[in-house]
Image: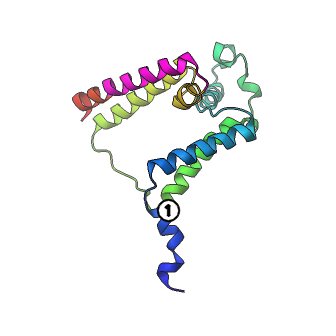
Amino acid sequence: MSEKKKYQFHELYLKKEWSYQTGAVLLALFSLALVIVTGKSWGVTGPLGMWGGWILSKLGIAVDTWAGFKATPVASYDIWKDLPALTNIGIVVGALLAVLLAAQFKIKKLKSIKNLWAAILGGLLMGIGARISLGCNIGAFFTALPAFSLHGWIFWISIFSGAAVGSKLLVKYFM
């Protein structure tokens, strides 16, 4: 068997970029499969909030008294029974596997301390925004718009406005 024939699948599906249309169709199919299997729409920030609460509780902070943890107390939280949490883990593992299989994994050196602060500030603002909007872009946008929810449209306007402002600030202060 020739070397070219032997690795054709790898070269075709793992090394070359997929089209946006292919990505969109796969995202829709996986999202539909998730709803069918779990009975829930795709959500990311809920489990991340629980993980943060769990970490804080291990540091001695009584988070079960906080409003965000009244419905599901941290003390009774089990990550292995939380299907959205397992989906989050799957996203991270799948992304790592994809870059490894495509031979694209790289550890890069920080260009400047400004880049580090931009990443920290951006992550904090995204986290705060996700909690205020009651979900990340998946729950507040991809799940809300097809359900014709008003908050999905407000989120859509807000996220694109925020991205425009954030991009200008990034270029002006952090680049």
Label 1 residue SS: helix
> If the image is split into quadrants, where does the C terminus sit?
top left
Residue 158 part of the magenta-drawn span? yes
Relative depth, front residue between 43 and 110: 43
Relative depth, front residue between 28 and 85: 28
Residue 162 part of the magenta-drawn span? yes
Q: Amino acid at mark 1?
A: Leu
Q: Give the percent coordinates (x, y) of residue 122.
A: 39, 29
- Classified by dominant secondary structure, the portion drawn in magenta counts as helix
Q: Give the percent coordinates (x, y) of residue 97.
A: 55, 56
2 over 70 or under it: above or below: below
User: Which residue is at a point 36% across and 27% down the rendered structure image?
Assistant: 163
Q: Give the percent coordinates (x, y) of residue 1.
A: 54, 86
Q: Give the percent coordinates (x, y) of residue 92.
A: 56, 46
130 over 70 or under it: above or below: below
Magenta residues (range):
147-166
144 left or right of 81 in image: left
User: Which residue is at a point 64% across and 28% down the rendered structure image?
Assistant: 50
Residue at which label 1 appears: 14
